[in-house]
């Protein structure tokens, strides 16, 4: 369970940034007073145009950033008070593969398992399962730099899931991927839901949202402009396509 | 501790597979000194041999007959008919190597037991010309001296009132310490810095540039432990670069021809356990200091290129104090002992010479440890800032 409670993220602007943004204000809000809940066994989608604050929100949930105000509870653990505890619960995956080119898939997964302080026997079992499921075994001994984007994304998935997190955060996980690789991510999200994990993902692709999502929130300019179930969103769209409905909502709040 | 070891293990595996780091931190330091020493000495020897064998074109104007006969060998070619006005041009354009003009009263002055005047024209940029001419003139001078001693019926000691016996009490170790002793720290400090530089760029800025830092920050390990793991890796690579330089230098010295056996014995003597331990005690905090400082700087950069532009000027800050230690008269004292880098360079010189004062040494090590702690603290402060670690 993820409980986002009135979070705000403000950045102090340098003189140069103030000049670039043509503002006299000393700070800027990337996320402004946002609240929502993601339930276990369901998929929550965070939507919004570029620069809306989606990635900032996901980074706060995954403890990379600390909220300026408000709090986020991940399985009742606060990202502000006990970020280390929260990190034990989460798995984080982005669309950009973000791996070490000179290491092999096996070495990368072992590194992250060790950082999660995993027991050796549990690690072995979990690694075998993930490598089998994702088909990593055939290139497990090759260095990442020699792998295709699709292979790299599979390794990214294994790295994010090795400690069997109960909460999984996907930040635009399919962006820039081919259809086959993107499909493996969609399958993973479904699998996570089936296993009762809490899943939150951000995306631009409405067809993916339609396919996977139980609940959704839309953020624009750092503000939450929609937060309800997918069912309610469909009803509100009044026969329009989901993309059109999304654009309407964003435009109404501009 | 387990987390730190995990980070070190991963960073070592990753870094040692990077050809650029491997070359700059291990291969180059190990080969630089042997190649430099062997190359320079061989080149110097070849040049000297060539210059020594070269036939010099010399003109002697108004020279006494018995001096001319001194130049009658195959290594000299005597050129005649040179006018006084054309001397400098002939030497400048290379048609002559040297010209000696004798005063018209030269022989008269010699016969009066006085000094005969002569002028030697040559280019100091032409190696060995002056030396070879002087050898001939010295032979001629010896003949005159001999004749004068006989004429005056005096002994040669009359013209040499001081009989000096030189007793050098400086041990070979001290001689090495005071001569090449300054060069050793100069080289290993630079290679230590370079050894830290590439891993720092790769492990800190590279992680930011690739975006891998983002996922690393979502694991249940503190930023402090991750940073310490990275700093230790960078420092160890810097230390090994410095050690490879020193090892390469000593191995190289053993392969150079013409080094006196005393000198080689002294080198073996220097390479004792005491020297190694004392050097290690300075080298480790120095590497940690470099690693911390570099990490604090490169974490501000979002690309490898930007980070390189930050650290390049730092190279000068390292080279300048190391170079000062090479200057004659700069000694380790209660003032220089506090100046970072200069102090380690001077202390190494003193350790090699065997003249180190332990109070000075302890201050050097203590100040290096303090600087290392401050540098790591500074890097941690930077690493803890969200805006620094994320692109």
Image: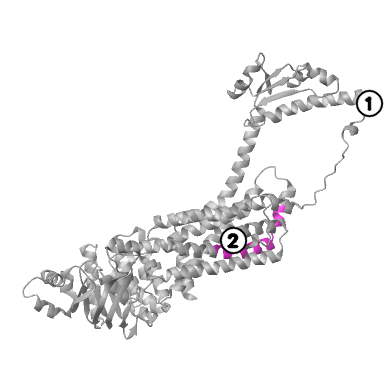
**Residue located at (89% from left, 31% from top):** B156
* Secondary structure predominantly adopted by residues drawn in magenta: helix
Q: Nearer the viewer, residue B361 or B214?
A: B361
Q: Residues within 10 Å of mark 1 (few under 14, many from 20)?
A: few
Q: Residues within 10 Å of mark 2 (few under 14, many from 20)?
A: some
* Quadrant in the picture for residue B288: bottom right
Q: How is the image coloured?
A: one colour
**Residue located at (57% from left, 65% from top):** B285
Is there any visible trace of residue A52 in the rendered image?
Answer: yes
Numbered mark located on residue A165 in the image: none
Q: Chain of mark 2?
A: B
In this rendering, would A140 be left or right of B150? left
What residue is pinned by disc 2? B340
Horizontal and vertical percent for residue B199?
47, 60
Up/down of B104 relative to B192, above or below: above
In this rendering, would A22 be left or right of A233? right
In this rendering, would B224 be left or right of B187? left
What residue is pinned by disc 1? B153
Specify which label sits upstream in the sequence, 1 or 2: 1
Horizontal and vertical percent for residue A214?
18, 79
Q: Nearer the viewer, residue B239 or B319?
A: B319
Horizontal and vertical percent for residue B352?
69, 56
Q: Residue furthest right?
A: B153
Q: Residue furthest left?
A: A239
Per the rendered image, the range of residues in magenta is: B266-287
* Quadrant in the picture for residue A140: bottom left
User: In the rendered image, which quarter contains the C terminus of chain B?
Assistant: bottom left
Q: Chain of mark 1?
A: B
């Amino acid at each position: 369970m993820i409980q986002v409670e009135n979070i705000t993220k403000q950045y102090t602007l340098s003189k140069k940034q103030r000049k670039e943004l043509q503002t006299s204000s000393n700070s800027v809000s990337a996320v402004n007073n946002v609240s929502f809940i993601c339930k276990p066994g369901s998929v929550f989608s965070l939507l919004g145009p570029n620069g809306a604050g989606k990635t900032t929100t996901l980074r706060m949930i995954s403890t990379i950033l600390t909220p300026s105000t408000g709090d986020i509870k991940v399985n009742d653990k606060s990202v502000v008070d006990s970020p280390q505890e929260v990190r034990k619960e989460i798995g984080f995956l982005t669309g950009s593969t973000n791996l070490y080119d000179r290491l092999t898939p096996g070495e990368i997964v072992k590194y992250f398992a060790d950082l999660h302080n995993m027991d050796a026997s549990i690690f072995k079992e979990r690694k075998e399962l993930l490598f089998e499921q994702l088909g990593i075994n055939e290139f497990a001994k090759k260095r990442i730099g020699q792998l295709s984007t699709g292979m790299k994304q599979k390794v990214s998935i294994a790295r994010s899931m090795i400690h069997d997190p109960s909460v999984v955060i996907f930040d635009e996980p399919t962006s820039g991927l081919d259809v086959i690789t993107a499909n493996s991510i969609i399958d993973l999200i479904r699998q996570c839901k089936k296993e009762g994990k809490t899943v939150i993902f951000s995306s631009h692709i409405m067809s993916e949202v339609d396919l996977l999502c139980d609940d959704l929130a839309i953020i624009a300019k750092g503000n939450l402009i929609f937060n309800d179930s997918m069912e309610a969103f469909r009803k509100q769209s009044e026969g329009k396509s989901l993309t059109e409905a999304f654009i309407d909502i964003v435009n109404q709040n501009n | 501790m387990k987390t730190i070891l995990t980070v070190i293990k991963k960073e070592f595996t990753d870094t040692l597979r990077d050809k650029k780091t491997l070359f700059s931190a291990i291969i180059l330091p190990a080969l630089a000194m042997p190649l430099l020493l062997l190359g320079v000495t061989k080149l110097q020897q070849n040049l000297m041999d060539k210059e020594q064998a070269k036939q010099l074109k010399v003109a002697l104007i108004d020279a006494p007959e018995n001096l001319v006969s001194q130049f009658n060998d195959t290594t000299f070619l005597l050129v005649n008919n040179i006018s006084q006005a054309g001397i400098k041009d002939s030497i400048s354009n290379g048609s002559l190597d040297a010209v000696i003009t004798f005063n018209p009263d030269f022989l008269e002055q010699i016969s009066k037991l006085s000094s005969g005047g002569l002028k030697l024209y040559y280019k100091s940029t032409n190696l060995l010309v002056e030396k070879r001419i002087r050898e001939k003139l010295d032979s001629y001078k010896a003949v005159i001296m001999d004749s004068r001693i006989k004429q005056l019926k005096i002994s040669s000691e009359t013209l040499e009132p001081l009989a000096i016996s030189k007793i050098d009490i400086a041990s070979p170790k001290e001689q090495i310490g005071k001569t090449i002793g300054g060069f050793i720290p100069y080289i290993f400090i630079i290679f230590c810095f370079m050894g830290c530089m590439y891993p720092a760029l790769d492990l800190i800025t590279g992680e930011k540039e690739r975006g891998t830092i983002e996922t690393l920050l979502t694991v249940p390990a503190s930023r402090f432990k991750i940073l310490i793991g990275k700093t230790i890796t960078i420092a160890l690579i810097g230390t090994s670069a410095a050690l490879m330089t020193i090892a390469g230098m000593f191995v190289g010295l053993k392969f150079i021809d013409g080094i006196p056996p005393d000198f080689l014995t002294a080198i073996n003597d220097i390479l004792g356990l005491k020297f190694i331990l004392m050097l290690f005690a300075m080298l480790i905090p120095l590497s940690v200091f470099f690693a911390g400082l570099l990490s604090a700087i490169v974490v501000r950069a979002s690309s490898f290129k930007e980070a390189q532009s930050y650290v390049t000027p730092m190279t000068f800050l390292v080279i300048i104090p190391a170079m000062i230690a090479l200057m004659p008269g700069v000694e380790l004292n209660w003032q220089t002992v506090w100046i970072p880098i200069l102090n380690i360079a001077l202390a190494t010189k003193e350790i090699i010479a065997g003249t180190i004062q332990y109070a000075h040494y302890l201050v050097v090590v203590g100040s290096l440890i303090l600087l290392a702690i401050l540098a790591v603290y500074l890097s941690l402060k930077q690493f803890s800032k969200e805006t620094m670690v994320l692109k």
